[in-house]
Amino acid sequence: MPENDRTPESNAEATGADAASLGVENAPEAVPSGSEALAEQGGADTVAVTDPAALVASLSAERDELARQRDEYYDLLLRRSAEFENFRRRVERERRELLEFAGMEAVAELLPIVDDFERALKVECADRDYVKGIELIYQRLLEALKKIGLEPMVSVGEKFDPRRHEAVEMTPSQEHEDHTVIEEYRRGYNFRGRLLRPAMVKVAVKPETDGSGQA
């Protein structure tokens, strides 16, 4: 219908309808009540509430486990430290022994030469200058060996000791105590307190007796 042909009544109806339409579109949203707002907020951001006793128990268990692991690692550290210290001491001891007895085998190889000098000096010789020369060389060699640790052993008159003596002859004797060294065939030596060569000796033993008690 053309606007000019509208009646006042129709214009009023149209205006009321438009107003009603604008009122619906521009009406503010309904504000929820307090309980509804809390419910919506709780649904959007839910926080799990744990029993305090259970939480304390869980934390205590975790603390105890950490303490157990700490003690275990500490004990392992102590054991490793002790093992390393023992290893260090053993290496140091072996190093000292190696340095201390490094010349032991070399000195042992020189002992037969010393023996030859001693046998030569026991032989009677009319040339006194020759004998003095041999004695001088022998003494100088022996002194040099003593400086690096060679120690001649005294055997004659000592009690026979199988750790230090090698008995090559056993002689019955009433003049000496039983198992006494009465003669030395080859001198024994120590090297820095350690046995280098046992002495070869003759040992006196107690004579056997017959039924009458006489030797």
Image (tube, rainbow, N blue to C red):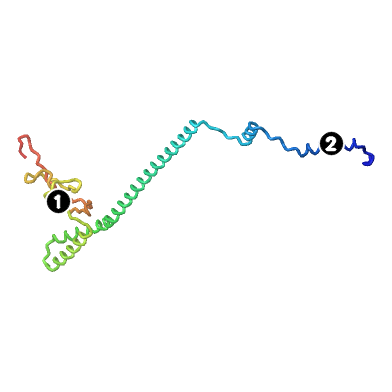
Q: Is 210 left, or right, of 199 in this rendering?
A: left
Residue located at (17% from left, 63% from top): 139
Q: Which mark is residue 16?
A: 2
**Between tags 1 and 2, which lies in front?**
2
Crowding at dot 2, Cα within 10 Å, few <14 / some 14-19 / many 20+, comes out as few
The residue at 6%/44% (across/down) is: 174
Secondary-structure class at tag 2: helix
Upstream in sequence: badge 1 or badge 2: 2
Amino acid type of disc 2?
Gly
Foreground pick, 177 / 82: 82
Residue at numbered disc 1: 155
Foreground residue among 213 and 54: 54
- Count neighbours of disc 1 (C-alpha within 10 A) and say few if under 14, some if 14 to 19, many if 20 or more: many
Left or right, 63 with reference to 6: left
Q: From where the camera sits, is residue 12 visible?
A: yes
Horizontal and vertical percent position of residue 171: 12, 46
Q: Nearer the viewer, residue 80 or 72?
A: 72
> What element does badge 1 sit on?
loop
Quarter of the image where the C terminus is located: top left
Residue 123 is labelled as none
Task: Inspect the image, locate mark 1, and give the three-letter code of the amino acid beneath it.
Answer: Ser
Left or right, 35 with respect to 7, comes to left
Horizontal arrangement in the rendering, residue 2 relative to residue 143 (left or right): right
In the picture shown, does residue 113 fall above or below 47?
Answer: below
Residue at 18 percent of width and 50 percent of height: 200
Q: Nearer the viewer, residue 118 or 188?
A: 188
Tag count in the figure?
Answer: 2
